[in-house]
Amino acid sequence: MNILDFGRFEFLRIERGELVLSPWPPTVRGVKFGAADTAKRKTIPGEFELKRQVAELLEYTRSVESGEIRRLQVRNGLPTEMEVEMAPDAERRSW
């Protein structure tokens, strides 16, 4: 997400509370003309504080037994919103 900066990930599977990243999900980069270069590679320090948005994404993911994130929107390298398709039997769980 940090390298993507602006854009979205699509069709991210969740199995037993973990994101399935193989194969890598389709990634769509947002490009805004007339803005600062968003394609610059960002370096990630060895130690960093987990941002609230990332912690919430991980917490939600861990609560899902099986499902699919249809769209995970990323802005400024952070998750901002997502659409999730739940497995039919998972809909009965309370969130």
Image (tube, rainbow, N blue to C red):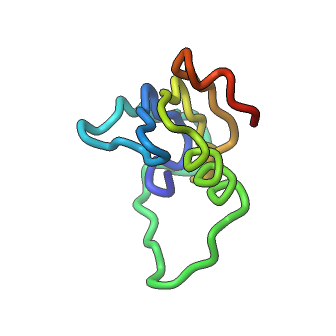
Asked whether residue 12 appears in the rendered view, the answer is: yes
Q: Position of residue 46 (x, y in %)?
A: 44, 84
Vertical order, 24 against 90 (above or below): below
Please state, as top left, top right, bottom left or bottom right, where the C terminus lies in the image.
top right
Vertical order, 1 against 71 (above or below): below
Nearer to me, 68 or 47? 68
Nearer to me, 92 or 23? 92
Whether residue 27 sits left or right of residue 93 in the image: it is: left
Q: Position of residue 25 (x, y in %)?
A: 35, 34
Residue drawn at (58%, 50%) of the image: 36
Vertical order, 40 against 60 (above or below): below
Whether residue 61 sits left or right of residue 28 in the image: it is: right
Residue drawn at (24%, 36%) of the image: 23
Nearer to me, 92 or 52? 92
Furthest residue in direction top, as rendered? 88
Asked whether residue 76 appears in the rendered view, the answer is: no
